[in-house]
Image: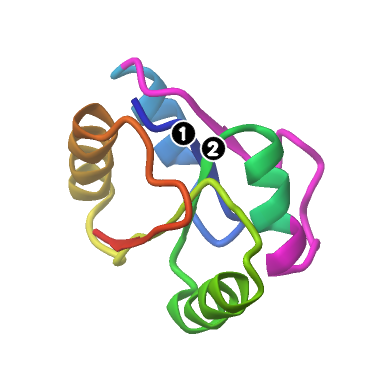
């Protein structure tokens, strides 16, 4: 199962709702990472063995391509499209339960 690390632009309510579904998740707030750069967030998520979840498509697409070109490894990026909170939880839960790893991958859900 994919572990998740929610970027600061993702509502922390998602973490509570995902935990209620037994999804392993942590947040930037919990790790005192608020205000850190996207690159720092991505590699911090790697230290947690967690895919980063963000709504910030353009910056993380750019960062994804930089990592691929430089050969830098990361635990995965999930660009979560803004929807109703329940729908985002449903999609993330289903995704986590159906994937073991998304290392060095970029997903849109």
Name the quarter where the C terminus is drawn. bottom left
Q: Residue under circle 1? A: 15
Q: Residue under circle 2? A: 50
Q: How is the image coloured?
A: rainbow
Q: Which mark is residue 93?
A: none
In-image side of 101 versus 61 (left or right): left
Residue 31 in the image, given as x and y percentages of width and height: 76, 36
Q: From what the image shows, is residue 69 above or below residue 96?
A: below
**Which comes sooner in the sequence, label 1 or label 2?**
1
Residue 27 in the image, given as x and y percentages of width and height: 61, 39
On the image, which quarter does residue 13 sit in?
A: top left
**Crowdedness near tag 2: few (<14), some (14–19) or many (≥20) residues, C-alpha within 10 Å:** many
The reply to whether residue 28 is visible in this rendering is: no
Measured Cα–Cα span from mark 1 to mark 2: 13 Å
| Foreground of the two, 107 or 30 | 107
Give the magenta-colored segment's residue range.
22-40
The reply to whether residue 57 is visible in this rendering is: yes
Residue 47 in the image, given as x and y percentages of width and height: 71, 37
Q: Is residue 108 magenta?
A: no
Residue 66 in the image, given as x and y percentages of width and height: 61, 79
Q: Secondary structure at mark 1?
A: helix
Name the quarter where the N terminus is drawn. top left
Residue at (40, 58) in percent of width and height:
105
| Foreground of the two, 95 or 35 | 95
In-image side of 34 versus 72 (left or right): right
| Foreground of the two, 72 or 108 | 72
């Amino acid at each position: 199962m994919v572990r998740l690390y929610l970027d600061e632009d993702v509502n922390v309510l998602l973490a509570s709702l995902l935990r209620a579904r037994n999804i392993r998740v942590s947040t930037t707030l919990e790790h005192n990472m608020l205000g850190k750069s996207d690159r720092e967030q991505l590699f911090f998520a790697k230290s947690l063995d967690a895919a980063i979840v963000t709504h910030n498509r353009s910056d993380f697409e750019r960062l994804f391509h930089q990592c691929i070109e430089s050969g830098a490894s990361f635990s995965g990026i999930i660009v979560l499209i803004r929807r109703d909170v329940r729908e985002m939880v449903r999609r993330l839960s289903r995704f986590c339960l159906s994937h073991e790893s998304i290392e060095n991958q970029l997903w849109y859900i």
